[in-house]
């Protein structure tokens, strides 16, 4: 008695797969996203098999022609996907066999779905990394140019979200740019480890056919074949590393988002975001909500969850491939989509941020933000720093009591706390004098901000000229 089982592997089975199990174990609903990468890998595999004599040239050409026709069907939305065929690989192979006959069954010679899916994911992720790389460059460019335009704009710098010392808005933006630059570098570094080819590792031990894995690697643009067949089919470090990159990127973007949300509030009123990046309220007509940064802030937790999911997925797997790894794709796919969406939104939005310079300046005047400048002034006059700290603390207490900032006090008022204070003190108590005094590399002086923006431009230009 014969039973209907999956034709690709059912020869040793005595009964068909349970209908629920068939649905439960199928991945085609989500891994069909890899279809064009799967076809690309199959074309390279067929080309290599012909080159080493496993396929004839005619068989190779028939397979490649059939795969190209399938790609057109997929692009047109006409491909007949089937859950009964489990996954993207078997759907394409079955369709190929329907189209070109028995030759289609020869395509899988010398490979397994284990090395096939590992190759597909790497091809997919490499392409997505290259797309994300461009968006990171676009965001960095926007930050750099906005910072250069705002090099002279004074705002309060904060620690503990309390007014600390005056800085420039341009300096603050370049701090964001530094964060994103590190993320950009991490992405480039991650790509090197993604670009290793598993194809040819077969199920776990390699293959007895005379495959030339270097040919396949060259055809697919990989740096080299993976050195160990067991690791090649079971490794998902590259997906975890990408998701770790994404988690750090979204963490940085969430920090940026938090500040954008604060700054657009009536309580800060430092910036304005264009209407196209905001929404209104269904009940409060005055509202203009900063939904883009709020949503990016919220999506950060989503990406963190995917990182934990992938780490947990891999933590107890023995070598080599296990069905657990079917669960790697949806977290990875969603991470890619989330990162691309967040970056596109920010790269579009940041250049359009409008600084409310008067409000920033007025906020910097409050909170005794030049107190440290006064302490430094006293030290230069020969006062020990701890004594200077005490003197300035007394001056601030006086200002709080009388509702005056340090720069608003008279010379006589300041001199009651120290005879070392002279008329030249007002040069450093102004906001302009305070920021201009930080005139060293990494400092907030406007000239340093412009110089830092130029260095960042040059670094970004150099990076974008390099091959990813």
Image (cartoon, rainbow, N blue to C red):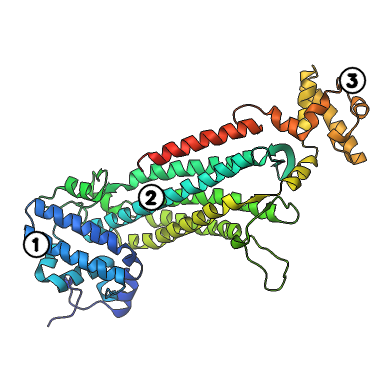
> Could you tell which of marks 2 and 3 lies nearer the N-terminus?
2
Q: Is residue 449 left or right of residue 199?
A: right
Is residue 277 or residue 44 the one in the foreground?
277
| Mark 2: secondary structure | helix
Residue 130's disc is: 2
Residues marked 3 and 1 touching at CB (< 8 Å): no
Q: Is residue 396 left or right of residue 133?
A: right
Q: Quadrant for residue 333, please give it.
A: bottom left
Q: Which residue is mark 3?
A: 419
**10 Å crowding of disc 1: few (<14), some (14-19), many (20+):** many
Q: Position of residue 8 (x, y in %)?
A: 18, 69
Relative to residue 105, is residue 368 depicted above or below? above
> Could you tell which of marks 3 and 1 lies nearer the N-terminus?
1
Residue 443 appearing in the image: no
Residues marked 2 and 1 touching at CB (< 8 Å): no
Q: Quadrant for residue 387, please give it.
A: top right
Q: Which residue is mark 1?
A: 59
Residue furthest top in the image: 382
Measured in 3D between alpha carbons, the distance from the residue under mark 2 to the one under mark 3, in whole angstroms, is 63 Å
Q: Position of residue 49 (x, y in %)?
A: 12, 54
> Could you tell which of marks 2 and 1 lies nearer the N-terminus?
1
Q: Position of residue 408 (x, y in %)?
A: 87, 35
């Amino acid at each position: 008695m014969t039973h209907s089982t999956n034709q690709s592997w059912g020869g040793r089975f005595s009964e068909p797969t349970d209908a629920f199990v068939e649905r439960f174990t199928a991945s085609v609903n989500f891994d069909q996203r890899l279809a064009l990468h799967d076809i690309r890998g199959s074309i390279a595999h067929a080309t290599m098999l012909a080159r080493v004599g496993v396929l004839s040239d005619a068989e190779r050409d028939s397979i490649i022609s059939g795969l190209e026709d399938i790609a057109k069907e997929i692009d047109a939305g006409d491909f007949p996907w089937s859950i009964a065929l489990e996954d993207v690989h078997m759907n394409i192979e079955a369709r190929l066999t329907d189209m070109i006959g028995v030759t289609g069954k020869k395509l899988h010679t010398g490979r397994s779905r284990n090395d096939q899916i590992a190759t597909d994911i790497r091809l997919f992720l490499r392409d997505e990394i290259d797309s994300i790389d461009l968006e990171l460059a676009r965001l960095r460019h926007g930050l750099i140019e906005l910072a250069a335009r705002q090099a002279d704009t004074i705002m309060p710098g904060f620690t503990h979200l309390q007014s600390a010392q005056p800085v420039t808005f341009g300096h603050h933006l370049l701090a964001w740019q530094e964060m994103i630059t590190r993320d950009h570098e991490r992405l480039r570094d991650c790509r090197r480890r993604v670009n290793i080819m598993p194809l040819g590792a077969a199920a776990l031990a390699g293959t007895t056919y005379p495959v030339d894995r270097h040919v396949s690697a060259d055809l697919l643009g990989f740096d080299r074949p993976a050195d160990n067949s067991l690791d090649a089919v079971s490794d998902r470090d590259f997906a975890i590393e990408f998701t770790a990159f994404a988690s750090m990127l979204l963490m940085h973007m969430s920090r940026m988002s938090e500040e954008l949300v604060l700054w657009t509030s009536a309580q800060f009123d430092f910036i304005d975001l264009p209407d196209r990046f905001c929404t209104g309220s269904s009940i409060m007509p005055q509202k203009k909500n900063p939904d883009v940064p709020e949503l990016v802030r919220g999506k950060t937790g989503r990406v963190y969850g995917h990182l934990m999911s992938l780490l947990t997925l891999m933590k107890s797997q023995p070598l080599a491939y296990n069905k657990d790894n079917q669960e790697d794709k949806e977290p990875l796919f969603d991470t890619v989509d989330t990162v691309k969406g967040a970056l596109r939104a920010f790269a579009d939005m940041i250049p359009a941020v409008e600084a409310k310079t008067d409000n920033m300046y007025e906020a910097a005047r409050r909170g005794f933000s030049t107190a440290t400048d006064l302490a430094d002034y006293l030290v230069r006059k020969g006062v020990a720093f701890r004594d200077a700290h005490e003197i300035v603390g007394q001056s601030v207490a006086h200002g709080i009591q009388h509702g005056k900032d340090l720069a608003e006090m008279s010379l006589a008022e300041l001199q009651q706390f120290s005879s070392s204070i002279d008329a030249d003190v007002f040069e450093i108590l102004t906001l302009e004098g305070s920021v201009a005094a930080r005139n060293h590399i990494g400092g907030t002086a406007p000239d340093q901000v412009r110089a830092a923006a130029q260095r960042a431009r040059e670094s970004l230009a150099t990076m974008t000229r390099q091959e990813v």
